[in-house]
């Protein structure tokens, strides 16, 4: 990766600000991590000041909303792989009725103004884009979807889809929009309590959501995301549609043809007063949900099982002020998040914790112990055992790929030569490393100790 071009790219998408000073309180979650200095020269935040610096004194973040990230085919050199992470980022500046985007590697541009005509918006919210340059905007107060096109030189108006109403193909304040690998368009029709599906040409296909109020009903749907296994940068073959509804309190998972698969209410996972705004999926199908009222990002696996929450309120490192739009370039795990007065840039990392060791003390008759390890992202795991002199006596898990979630790793009390280790204190050394761009730049190390005792000792007295 060419650090100079990447620095320029990061600047032009305005996801920049000089790295904040450390918080000094031990707070350092790593589910998302900052790109290395050589990639961004230490920049990973932007504020209205930086936007005005690039675009003029009259431009500022005014209720930023959705974000879309894509690598355009029109600007990609298929021979030169060094430019593969030079993405195009589109951000909705809602109260300014405009789209902020990078027109080239050296320029940021603005498209749109207030109005009802071509190239005009009224409080737009969601946005989606694909590699062919198709960009779709949920033009909320105009009750329509606006189709734009980016040829690599800039955005241009293509057409509109829909109008105000409740009939098929009509909208009442649409808020979210997403695309699958075939260009099918999915729209949260908020006022009509449904998700509408359109072909890539803009023709109505079907509605999702039980209008009778039964299982599968959507209520005031908002954020939306699609994971499509047919996409080049999808690890699994799953195809799922994720929808935020009930005023940001619930997320539902559907098949792409509208069958309800799963649902989770935020209160059921201990998150109170949630205001989930936007969704994004990564390469492994994990779902990221921005929570504006709790100032954090909630992460779920592809089956909608809760994994972890990331961030807290503030203006420092790994802190947010009302995060909303989130976009992920799945190939390299580049993550762009907009908040109330700015934007942030991360890479997908991995966090890990040792949930327990059972038992911590063992003898000859009941030799060995089990380590319970929790991972927030699919990653490579390495586990070794060392003695009191720091000599490695057993390489238990040599760079084994593991899915996210909880794993039990058993040590049978033997060394690499399959001989029982002598009594003493042993250290379990765990290293986890992500599989995205952050691999090689970031890893997390955990340690814990266990004790092997002589058989005549009372094991219960040693814990």
Image (spheres, helix red, strand yellow):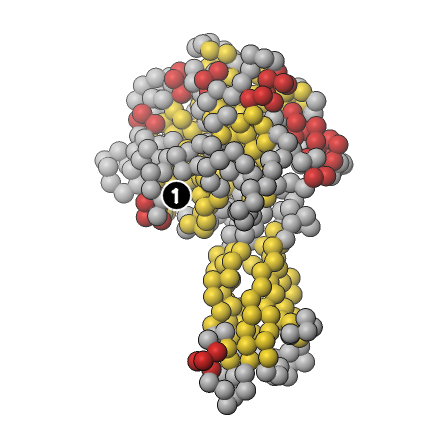
Q: Residue at x 35, y 48 (%)?
A: 270
Residue designated by label 1? 253
Q: Residue furthest bottom?
A: 456
Residue 449 visible, this orientation: yes
Residue 175's x, y, as percent?
40, 26
Residue 323's x, y, as percent?
47, 33
Q: Tell me: residue 91, above or below residue 241.
A: above
Q: Tell me: residue 98, above or below residue 388.
A: above
Q: Residue at x 62, y 71 (%)?
A: 385
Q: Residue at x 51, y 58 (%)?
A: 353
Which type of secondary structure does the marked residue at label 1 adopt?
Answer: strand
Residue 156 visible, this orientation: no
Q: Residue at x 55, y 15 (%)?
A: 59
Residue 153's x, y, as percent?
66, 19
Quadrant of the snapshot with the N terminus:
top right
Q: Is residue 406 left or right of residue 233?
A: left
Residue 302's x, y, as percent?
46, 48
């Amino acid at each position: 990766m060419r650090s100079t071009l990447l620095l320029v790219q990061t600047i032009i998408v305005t996801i920049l600000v000089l790295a904040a000073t450390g918080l000094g309180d031990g707070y350092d979650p790593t589910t998302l991590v900052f790109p290395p200095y050589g990639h961004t020269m230490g920049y990973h935040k932007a504020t209205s000041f930086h936007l005005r610096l690039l675009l003029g004194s009259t431009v500022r973040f005014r209720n930023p909303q959705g974000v879309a990230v894509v690598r355009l085919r029109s600007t990609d050199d298929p021979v030169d792989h060094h430019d593969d992470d030079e993405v195009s980022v589109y951000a909705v500046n809602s109260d300014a009725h405009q789209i902020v985007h990078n027109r080239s590697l050296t320029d940021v541009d603005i498209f749109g103004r207030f109005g009802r005509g071509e190239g005009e918006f009224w409080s737009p919210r969601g946005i989606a884009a694909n590699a062919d340059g198709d960009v779709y905007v949920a033009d909320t107060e105009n009750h329509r979807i606006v189709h734009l096109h980016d040829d690599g030189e800039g955005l241009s108006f293509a057409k509109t889809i829909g109008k105000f109403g409740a009939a098929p193909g009509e909208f009442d304040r649409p808020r979210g929009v997403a695309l699958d690998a075939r260009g099918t368009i999915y729209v949260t029709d908020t006022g009509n309590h449904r998700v509408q599906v359109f072909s890539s040409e803009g023709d109505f296909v079907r509605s999702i959501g039980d209008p009778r109020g039964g299982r599968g009903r959507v209520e005031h749907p908002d954020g939306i995301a699609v994971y499509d296994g047919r996409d080049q940068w999808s690890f699994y073959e799953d195809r799922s549609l994720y929808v935020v509804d009930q005023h940001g309190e619930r997320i539902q998972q559907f098949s792409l043809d509208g069958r309800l698969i799963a649902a989770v209410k935020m209160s059921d996972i201990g998150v109170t007063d949630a205001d989930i705004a936007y969704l994004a999926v990564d390469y492994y199908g994990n779902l990221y949900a921005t929570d504006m009222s709790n100032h954090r990002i909630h992460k779920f696996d592809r089956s909608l099982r809760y994994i972890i929450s990331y961030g807290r309120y503030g203006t420092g490192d790994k802190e947010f002020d009302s995060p909303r739009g989130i976009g992920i370039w799945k190939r390299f795990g580049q993550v762009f998040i907009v908040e109330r007065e700015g934007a942030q840039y991360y890479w997908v990392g991995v966090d890990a914790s040792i949930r327990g060791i059972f038992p911590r003390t063992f003898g000859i008759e009941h030799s060995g112990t089990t380590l319970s390890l929790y991972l927030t992202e699919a990653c490579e795991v390495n586990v070794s055992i060392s003695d009191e002199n720091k000599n490695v006596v057993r390489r238990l898990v040599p760079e084994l790929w593991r899915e996210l979630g909880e794993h039990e790793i058993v040590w049978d009390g033997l060394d690499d030569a399959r001989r029982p280790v002598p009594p003493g204190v042993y250290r379990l050394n765990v290293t986890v490393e992500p599989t995205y761009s952050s691999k090689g730049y970031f890893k997390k190390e955990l340690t814990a100790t266990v004790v092997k005792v002589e058989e005549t000792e009372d094991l219960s007295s040693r814990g």
